[in-house]
Every structure is written in structure tokens, then in C-alpha cells.
């Protein structure tokens, strides 16, 4: 490279340095207190500018000299490294839109999140400055014109002649390391084809782990309601910047209203937190925060964001959906946090492997354990934002919200040093009890800043829609703005309702009257809206609100239109009979809203317009006892009676096959087909003897009327995997009402069917009996009814085994206890050849959660055979002790030994003993326990070798040391080890040879010190050194050569192996 080219490089670097320095200076001037690292960085950049100017002048004087700098010269390498470092620094700001840089909150945070990066940058710049200063001398210029390798070759000479040169060589080495690291990113990549294949597999995993929940839908809806600059006050606050910089919990909660009296059912503690208002704009504010954190995490701040919106519409009146959402939350967070990460933790891969192929769902414990692993692995700040915790129902039966709150408290208990959690909710008593102390009482969303957001929303509303008629009426506009801002008291929802009512006013006088009569509370506002519904529309409005309150999914416009006029016993409804929805929706528009969503109707997804409550507070008000006129809270049975009683009629009127014009004539029939039994089960929870509804279900399932029953299955079959069998059958042989009542969990119908003579032991070919399906679905009461009516607890089915196996399959502890109490044989044959339910239970246990351990203990208590075997494929046989030892279930291993498990029982040819299985899976504590109970440390090998050989193959050094301490034979020889996958037919036979498989040089050293015979051969006559050379294990070769290992003549003369040992 000639001096001119080098000069151009220096000039380019100088220009970049000036630009970055200017940007950093603007940032420092824009904040009150710039971080010390930013000030140091600016100082180093200024120094770099000065030395580059001097270097530019020095090189300008060399233009007449012969070229002596190459692209590979140390000076040019340093310039490249410095240029790359400054490019990375400038990219953080240079690629941002100008509007981001103008955001005060963004400037305040973006640089503060780069502390570690800035310290690395400062160190690199300082090294470059020293090198550039050194190059300003003739001696230094001569040194830096050489390549790094040339510099290192002459290092000894330089050490004797110049201390400065020695120092600069060290600096150049560090610079070279910096550059090699950057260049090495590309060199270490896999082939393009392999990358695509891996990316495809990774994408499939992430899509599966994320499930069907997409938080961006709720986020986009919230953002659509947001006015520009809403929530900016919070982004500029110390609370937000403090949370961004310091891992902790931040809880934003709503405001509280003052009540003269409390509902009589409340306890003293509940009264303390009663009356915290809905509708103060928490969700819109949360969407603003999410967008801000997105910006920070997208611009090189080493942060990851995961967010989730709890929406009451998603699991309204459906306890099963509450269970799903307890899984949906960690699944969604896993999907977001794992996106674009180079590697996925083993627990995430394990969940996918365990469940994806079988179609099963991971447990909440499995998912949260995987989420913990992801957060722990991420070497960056993790931001988790959860909106509207109060919209996750508090269900006293399953305490799912309590479980959610406990999970949050566990996440912020100090285990993670990089986790920032922000939540929003009303300040309800259980949420405050769980999070209050952790979040220092939380942060109320109220004050002048919130009032400014409300005022901004009011002004925007006056510019469009019905209120735009007053756009030019300054006095009226001012009155509306003032009265609503003053009356809002932080409640956006209250303002929305008042604006809707003001939109009905068409004269100045009516506006003034409406403003004078503004109601104080949201409850009073809702009551006024309900009272304002004309008498002619009330009969239509009430069932609409009832259906919306208790439906299991969003209702379509057609469904709502029919529900408004549907009465029990009605036949098909003519189009002329349908209510005028536009009128009802207009009157109730502050209560309900229209939205376009993807809705699953009878297993088919459709994007369709649905009717929903406008806000969570609407549902809460209607289902409470606070309304004097229009409460729908009597009980869900009343609210859903029309749907339940109309099920048989609606489906019977439906045409064969469920297709054609008739399908559109009864849209509610689709809803009834999919959800009727869930409503019936909910009613039975309230009162098991509500004959009006339970009799309806019995008539539908029984009374020898299979035609209606089979039409239902054509429309929707709750057991998808058997729909192909039943839906093609139209005769009496396909009619199994007791099996279906057991599947659905309908108690009253099950009793009535049995009383009517149904055979409790009838089997469906391929699908078991009623007791099998009740056990599998976890319907305890149904199983109890069947057993008390004579169902055989030991009835065996070739596809499902026994009912006890069905209960164990799903880890239903109470079901298993019930069946055992009714005589279920814990040692009955399972559908697995020579298996047992004990082995089924052990096989299902998750080591990370211990989910199902109680079932194992239950089976052991009731005499399960601890030495029963289960065959799994070719040459693989297990006992319970094998499985428990491999998984590291220490307590279960102890229980099995106490119950007489054979500690040295061999498995199949590929398994060996329990000790060998524990050693192969690095279960150190389990191996210690087995050895203490007399396990044979040198038991004959299975396909994975002796315990020591298995540990050596996997490279478990602590395990190797433990086994050697307990007398493991270091020279045990095995001729039937299974070959390593990528070594074809060349098999190791000793522990030393096993340690070569993955080049475990430190274990090789340990074995040699313990007397391992380095020259022992495998069945093909190869020594350890032969195998190490054949497999290219250079670290192990070095150790073997140092200790005098020999090789066979055949290998020594092989060209393919020549030279490997000679290096050492």
C-alpha cells in the first residue's frame, strides 16, 4: 500500500471520529447528568482526533518515499480495528430516525444502557492511540509497516533493543485479537444450506413454543387508541429510567374511589383495597412503555423484551381457558425472548422434543423452568411487561391468579440479576398483598401528567366524529374540555362514556344541560346508559348483554342478532324476526363495540366481525350487584338458559352434514354445538340439581334419539381424534351417549343414563370405556359415579390399558387414588408389553419440576412391583430403578431400594445396571446413593459400557473421580460397546479409549495416573493412541505421547495418520 492509500484511510478514520465526537457531545449537552463513561469516551475521542491529525501530517511527508505499508501491516490493521469500533459506536445513533434522537427520554436512556460496551470501546481507542503515537517515529513506523507475524518473529531482537517496541508489540497483538474476533464471526459460520436448515427447524420450534397466543394483537389495539405524546410524562420520569437501568419490579396501579359504604360480603382486608377504579388508561400507557422499550432493545442496547396483555375477553367465564393462559404467558415470553438468539437452552429443546411429536402440551412448571433457563442464559437485560393483571380472573376454585402472582414474586426474588418486570393493574387486595412490598407500594397512575393525557384525548375527540360539529365553537369546546378534565379524576373510561353521550347532543342548550348533569362515577354512568335504552329495545338488549357476559368466545354479529330474539323451544327464525342490531348497538355503544378478529368456530378459523364489551369495567358492572335496574348477576344458569335449552332444537333443525343455507339460518347452533356442554358443566358447579338444564342435556344425549346426537358430531366433535370414526357412522352402533357424557364431564346426564340402563362397562373399539375416558380427562365425579355403579376398575383395553393407566398417563393424582380405593390393580398389564403403571409414571416425570412424584409414591405405597420391566425397542429393557436413577430422582430411588428393588438388576443389552444409567446421565448424588447401598461398581457392561466407561464417554470428570474412588476397574475391557455414531465400526473397549470419543484429555490424564493401560487394544487391535490419531483427537494425542503411549505397526505406517503424533 502506498502512503497515499494509507493517508486516505487515516483521513476517513479522522472524519468518522469527528462525526462520532460531535454526536456524543450533543448527547452530553442534552442531559443534566451525563454518565462518567460517556465523559471519558468523549475525552478519548478528542485525543484520537489529535493523534490522527498528527499521523495524517506525518504520512503526508512520506509521499515521496517508496511504498512500505501493506494491507496486512500492523498499522493498517490498527486503523481497520479503530474504524470498526467507531462504526459500531456510531451505528447506535446514526441509523436511528431523527425523531428518536429528539425524544428526551430516549437520549436519556440509550447511552446509559451501553456502559459495558463503552468501557470496551474506551480500552480499544486507548490502544489505538498508543499505536498511532508510536508510528510517528521512524523506529515505530518501521515496526508497524510489517505484518503482525513478522513483528512477532523479530520480537526477541526488539526486546533487547527497545522497551517501547516491546510495549507496542503487545498492543498490536491485542488489536489483532480485536480484529480477528470481528473477522472470525464470519469464518465460524456454518454452510449456507445448513444455516437455512437450522433456521427452519428453529423457526418451527419457536412457532410451536409460542402457541396460538399473539400479544401483538392486543398491543396493536391499544396503540390504535393512543393519542400522540400520551404517556410521555412517564417515559421522562425517574421511575421509568430507574427501572430501565436497575433490575427490579415496577407496579403501576389505578386510582381509588372513596365509598361511603362497602359491599357487606367484603372482609376487613378486602375493604381496604375495594373501590380501585377501572378505566384510568393503564393499557394505553402500557402500550406506550412497550414501544419505548422496543426502541431501546432494537438499537444495540443488549436488551430483550417480552410482553403480555391479560384481556378479560380471552378467558371470560371459562376456567379451562384460565389454565391455558397460565401456559400461554410463559409460552409467549419464551417465543419473544428466544427470537434471534444464537442458541436455545436445553430445557427449551427438551420441551419441544418431549411434546411436539406426541401432540401433548407442556405443563406450566416445564414452561416456567425453561423460561428461567432462557433468562439465566441471556447475557443482557431482560424486560418483561405484563398488562392488566386484574383482568385475569380470581377463581377461588383453582386459584390461578394466586398462582400467577406467586410466579411473579418468584421471578423477582433476586435469582436474576438482569430481570426487569413491569406490571399494571388495579390495586386489588390480592395483587397488593403479593406485589406491594416488592414494588415499594407501586406507583399510582394519577396526577397532572395523566390529566394532560386526558385533555389531549378530549381535544382529539372534538376534532372528529359527532363532536366535530362544535369544532368552531370555541366557548363550547372550552366548556367540554374543562368539565370533562375536571370530572375525570384520572379515568379515561369515564371520559369516553361522557363523550359518547355528548355526541348525541345537537344543540348548544343540550350540551350545556348534559355538562351540568354529568355523573360523578363510572357506575352511575353505566346505569344511566342502561336506563336510557328505549322500552321497545330492552327485551333485545338484555339477552344481548347476557350472552356477551357469559359466552365462551367472542360472538359474531349474526349470533348476537339471533340471540337477541332466541327463546327456548323456538323453531328456525326468519330473517324478518331478527332484531335491528344497529339500533341496539347505537344505544349501547359505550358498553359494547365491534371488532374484527380471527375466531375459531367449530374448529375452523375465520376472520369475522364480533361484538364485545367496550371495557372490562362493563362486564364487571353488569355481573355485580351494583346495578339497581339491569343486573345479570343472578347466576350464569339464567344468563345461558336460552342457549342450553335450545341445544336439541337448534341442532335437530340443522340440515344433515351441517352445510348449506340452513347453516346460516341458525348461527347460534354453531355456538351451541361447540359450547353447550361447557355451559351445562358450569351450571352443575352452582347446583347439581338444576333439572331444567341437566334434563336438557340428558334428553340430548339419551332417550334413544341418536339422530340429533350424530348431527351434533357432524357439526363439532369434542374428541377430534375419533371424529373420523364416529362421524361416518349413522346407525345405532355409533351411538355411545354414556361414553360422551363421561368425556364431557356432565354428572346429571351420566347418572340418568346409568339409571336408564346404560352399560357402564361398554367399550368403544379403539377408544376404551366410559371409565377410561373419565380417568384420562380427570373427571373425578364422573369416575366416582361410574365406579359406584359397577364399572370395572381393572377393565383392560388394548389401546388405553386399564383406567388406572389412563389416570397415570395424565398424572391425575386424585383419579389414581379413587381407582385404587375401588380395587384397581397397580400391577395389572399395561398397553406396553411387560410394562407397569409405575414405569409409565416414572417415564412421564419431569426432572426439572418433579411433576407427578406423588403418583409414584402412591403406587409404591399400594404395592407396585418395583422390579417389573418395560421393553422399549431393540435390546432396551428398564426397571423402575433404571428410570429413576437416570433421571436423578433421589427420593424415588431411595423408596425403590426400601421396597426391595434389585440394585444390580441388568437392563437390556443397551442399558446395563441402574448405576451405569445414573453414571451415563451424570447423576452424581444418585450414584453416591447406589454405591452406599451396595451397587456393583464393576457390573458387567451393557451397550453403553461399565459405569466408568459410560462416564468417560460423556466426559463427566466428577463422576469418573467418584467411581474410581469406589474401586472402579480402570482397565475393564468390553467387546460389545455400541460404536459412537460418527466413528462407523471402530469401537472403544476400555475407559481410556472411551475418553477419546470427545477428546476428553483431562480424563485421559486422570485415568493414566490411576493406572490405565495405554497400550490395551480394542477388538480390532487398536491402542488408545491408534484411535486418537484415527479420530483426530489432538489434545488426547499430546497427553498419550507425553506418557509414552505406543501405536500398532499397521497404524504407524498409515499415510492417513502420519504426522499427527510427531507434532507433539
Image (cartoon, rainbow, N blue to C red):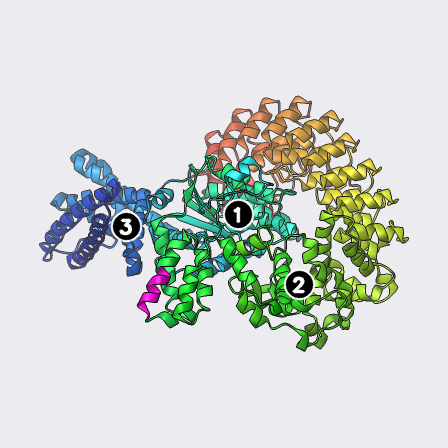
The residue lying furthest to the right in this view is 757
Q: Residue at x 84, y 59 (%)?
A: 702
**Which mark is first along the chain, 2 or 1?**
1
Residue denoted by label 3: 85
Pick the front one: 583 or 463: 583
Q: Nearer the viewer, mark 3 or mark 2?
A: 2
Q: Is residue 394 left or right of residue 3?
A: right
The quarter of the picture where residue 224 lies is bottom left
Provide the major secondary structure of the magenta segment: helix
Residue denoted by label 1: 390
Q: Residue at x 54, y 57 (%)?
A: 527
Query: Real-space Cα distance between discs 3 and 1?
Result: 47 Å
Expressed as whole percent of the image width and height from the top left, the position of residue 68 reads 17, 53
Pick the front one: 787 or 1060: 787
SS for dot 2:
loop
**Which mark is first along the chain, 2 or 3?**
3
The magenta segment is: 473-481
Pick the front one: 830 or 497: 497
Residue denoted by label 2: 603
Query: Real-space Cα distance between discs 3 and 2?
Result: 54 Å
SS for dot 1:
helix
Amino acid at each position: 500500500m502506498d502512503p497515499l492509500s494509507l493517508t486516505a484511510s487515516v483521513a476517513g478514520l479522522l472524519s468518522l471520529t469527528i462525526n462520532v465526537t460531535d454526536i456524543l457531545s450533543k448527547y452530553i449537552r442534552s442531559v443534566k447528568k451525563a454518565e462518567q463513561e460517556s465523559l471519558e469516551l468523549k475525552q478519548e475521542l478528542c485525543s484520537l482526533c489529535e493523534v490522527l491529525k498528527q499521523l495524517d501530517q506525518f504520512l503526508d511527508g512520506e509521499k515521496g518515499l517508496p511504498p512500505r505499508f501493506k494491507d496486512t501491516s500492523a498499522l493498517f490493521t490498527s486503523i481497520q480495528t479503530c474504524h470498526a469500533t467507531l462504526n459500531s459506536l456510531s451505528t447506535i445513533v446514526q441509523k436511528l430516525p431523527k425523531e428518536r434522537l429528539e425524544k428526551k427520554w430516549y437520549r436519556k436512556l440509550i447511552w446509559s444502557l451501553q456502559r459495558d460496551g463503552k468501557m470496551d470501546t474506551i480500552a480499544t481507542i486507548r490502544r489505538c492511540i498508543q499505536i498511532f503515537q508510536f508510528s510517528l517515529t521512524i523506529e515505530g513506523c518501521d515496526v508497524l509497516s510489517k505484518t503482525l507475524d513478522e513483528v512477532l518473529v523479530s520480537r526477541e531482537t526488539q526486546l533487547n533493543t527497545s522497551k517501547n517496541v516491546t510495549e507496542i508489540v503487545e498492543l498490536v497483538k491485542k488489536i489483532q485479537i480485536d480484529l480477528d474476533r470481528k473477522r472470525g464471526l464470519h469464518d465460524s459460520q456454518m454452510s449456507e444450506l445448513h444455516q437455512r436448515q437450522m433456521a427452519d427447524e428453529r423457526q418451527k420450534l419457536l412457532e410451536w413454543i409460542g402457541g396460538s397466543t399473539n400479544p401483538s394483537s392486543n398491543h396493536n389495539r391499544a396503540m390504535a387508541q393512543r393519542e400522540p405524546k400520551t404517556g410521555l410524562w412517564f417515559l421522562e420520569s425517574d421511575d421509568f429510567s430507574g427501572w430501565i437501568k436497575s433490575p427490579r419490579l415496577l407496579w403501576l396501579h389505578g386510582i381509588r374511589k372513596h365509598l361511603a359504604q362497602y359491599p357487606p360480603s367484603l372482609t376487613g382486608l378486602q375493604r381496604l383495597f375495594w373501590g380501585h377504579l377501572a378505566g384510568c388508561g393503564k393499557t394505553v400507557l402500557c402500550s406506550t412503555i412497550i414501544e419505548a422499550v422496543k426502541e431501546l432493545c432494537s438499537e444495540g442496547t443488549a436488551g430483550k423484551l417480552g410482553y403480555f396483555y391479560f384481556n378479560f375477553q380471552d378467558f371470560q367465564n371459562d376456567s379451562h381457558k384460565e389454565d391455558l393462559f397460565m401456559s400461554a404467558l410463559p409460552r409467549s415470553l419464551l417465543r419473544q425472548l428466544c427470537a434471534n438468539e444464537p442458541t436455545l437452552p436445553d430445557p427449551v429443546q427438551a420441551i419441544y422434543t418431549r411434546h411436539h411429536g406426541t401432540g401433548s402440551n407442556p405443563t406450566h412448571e416445564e414452561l416456567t423452568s425453561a423460561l428461567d433457563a432462557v433468562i439465566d442464559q441471556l447475557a443482557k437485560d431482560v424486560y418483561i411487561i405484563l398488562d392488566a393483571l386484574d383482568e385475569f380472573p380470581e377463581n377461588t376454585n383453582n386459584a390461578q391468579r394466586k398462582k400467577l402472582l406467586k410466579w411473579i414474586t418468584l421471578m423477582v426474588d433476586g435469582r436474576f440479576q438482569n430481570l426487569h418486570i413491569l406490571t399494571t393493574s388495579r390495586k386489588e387486595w390480592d395483587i397488593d398483598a403479593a406485589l406491594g412490598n416488592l414494588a415499594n407500594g407501586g406507583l399510582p397512575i394519577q396526577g397532572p401528567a395523566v390529566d394532560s393525557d386526558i385533555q389531549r384525548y378530549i381535544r382529539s375527540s372534538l376534532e372528529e366524529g359527532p363532536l366535530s360539529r362544535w369544532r368552531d365553537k370555541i366557548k363550547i369546546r372550552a366548556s367540554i374540555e374543562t368539565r370533562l378534565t375536571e370530572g375525570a379524576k384520572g379515568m379515561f373510561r369515564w371520559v369516553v362514556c361522557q363523550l359518547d353521550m355528548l355526541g348525541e347532543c345537537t344543540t348548544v342548550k343540550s350540551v350545556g344541560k348534559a355538562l351540568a348533569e354529568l355523573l360523578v362515577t363510572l357506575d352511575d354512568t353505566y346505569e344511566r346508559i342502561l336506563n336510557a335504552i328505549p322500552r321497545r329495545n330492552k327485551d333485545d338488549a338484555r339477552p344481548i348483554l347476557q350472552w356477551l357476559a357469559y359466552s365462551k368466545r367472542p360472538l359474531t354479529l349474526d349470533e348476537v342478532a339471533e340471540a337477541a330474539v332466541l327463546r327456548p323451544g323456538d323453531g328456525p327464525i326468519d330473517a324478518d324476526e331478527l332484531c335491528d342490531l344497529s339500533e341496539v348497538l347505537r344505544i349501547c355503544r359505550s358498553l359494547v363495540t365491534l371488532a374484527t378478529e380471527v375466531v375459531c368456530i367449530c374448529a375452523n378459523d375465520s376472520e369475522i366481525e364480533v361484538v364485545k364489551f367496550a371495557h372490562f369495567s362493563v362486564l364487571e358492572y353488569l355481573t355485580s350487584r351494583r346495578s339497581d335496574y339491569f343486573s345479570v348477576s343472578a347466576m350464569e344458569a339464567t344468563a345461558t338458559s336460552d342457549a342450553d335449552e335450545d341445544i336439541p332444537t337448534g341442532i335437530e333443525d340443522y340440515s344433515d352434514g351441517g352445510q348449506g343455507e340452513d347453516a346460516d339460518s341458525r348461527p347460534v347452533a354453531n355456538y351451541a354445538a361447540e359450547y353447550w356442554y361447557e355451559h351445562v358443566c358450569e351450571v352443575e358447579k352452582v347446583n347439581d340439581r338444576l333439572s331444567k338444564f341437566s334434563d336438557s342435556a340428558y334428553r340430548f344425549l339419551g332417550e334413544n334419539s341418536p339422530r340429533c346426537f350424530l348431527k351434533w358430531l357432524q357439526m363439532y366433535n369434542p374428541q377430534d381424534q375419533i371424529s373420523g370414526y364416529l362421524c361416518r357412522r349413522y346407525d345405532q352402533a355409533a351411538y355411545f351417549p354414556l361414553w360422551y357424557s363421561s368425556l364431557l364431564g356432565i354428572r346429571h346426564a351420566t347418572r340418568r343414563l346409568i339409571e336408564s340402563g346404560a352399560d357402564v362397562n361398554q367399550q368403544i373399539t379403539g377408544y376404551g370405556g366410559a371409565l377410561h375416558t373419565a380417568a384420562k380427562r380427570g373427571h373425578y365425579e364422573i369416575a366416582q359415579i361410574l365406579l359406584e355403579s359397577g364399572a370395572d376398575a381393572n377393565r383392560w383395553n388394548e389401546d388405553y390399558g386399564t383406567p388406572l393407566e389412563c389416570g397415570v398417563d395424565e398424572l391425575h393424582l386424585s383419579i389414581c387414588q379413587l381407582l385404587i380405593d375401588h380395587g384397581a390393580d397397580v400391577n395389572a398389564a399395561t398397553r406396553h408389553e411387560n410394562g407397569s403403571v409405575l414405569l409409565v409414571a416414572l417415564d412421564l416425570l419431569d426432572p426439572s419440576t418433579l411433576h407427578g412424584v406423588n403418583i409414584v409414591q402412591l403406587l409404591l405405597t399400594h404395592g407396585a412391583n418395583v422390579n417389573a420391566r418395560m421393553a422399549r425397542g431393540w435390546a432396551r429393557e428398564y426397571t423402575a430403578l433404571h428410570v429413576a436413577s437416570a433421571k436423578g430422582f433421589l427420593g424415588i430411588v431411595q423408596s425403590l431400594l426400601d421396597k426391595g428393588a434389585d440394585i444390580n438388576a441388568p437392563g437390556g443389552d443397551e442399558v446395563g445396571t441402574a448405576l451405569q444409567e445414573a453414571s451415563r446421565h451424570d447423576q452424581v448424588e444418585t450414584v453416591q446413593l447406589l454405591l452406599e447401598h451396595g451397587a456393583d461398581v464393576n457390573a458387567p457392561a451393557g451397550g453403553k459400557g461399565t459405569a466408568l466407561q459410560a462416564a468417560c464417554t460423556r466426559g463427566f470428570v466428577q463422576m469418573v473421580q467418584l467411581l474410581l474412588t469406589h474401586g472402579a476397574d480402570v482397565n475393564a475391557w468390553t467387546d460389545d460397546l455400541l460404536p459412537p455414531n460418527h466413528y462407523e465400526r471402530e469401537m472403544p473397549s476400555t475407559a481410556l479409549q472411551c475418553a477419546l470419543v470427545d477428546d476428553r484429555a483431562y480424563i485421559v490424564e486422570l485415568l493414566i495416573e490411576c493406572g490405565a493401560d495405554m497400550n490395551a487394544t480394542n477388538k480390532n487391535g487398536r491402542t488408545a493412541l491408534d484411535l486418537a490419531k484415527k479420530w483426530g483427537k489432538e489434545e488426547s494425542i499430546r497427553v498419550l505421547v507425553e506418557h509414552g503411549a505406543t501405536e500398532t505397526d499397521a497404524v504407524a505406517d498409515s499415510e492417513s495418520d502420519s504426522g499427527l503424533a510427531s507434532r507433539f
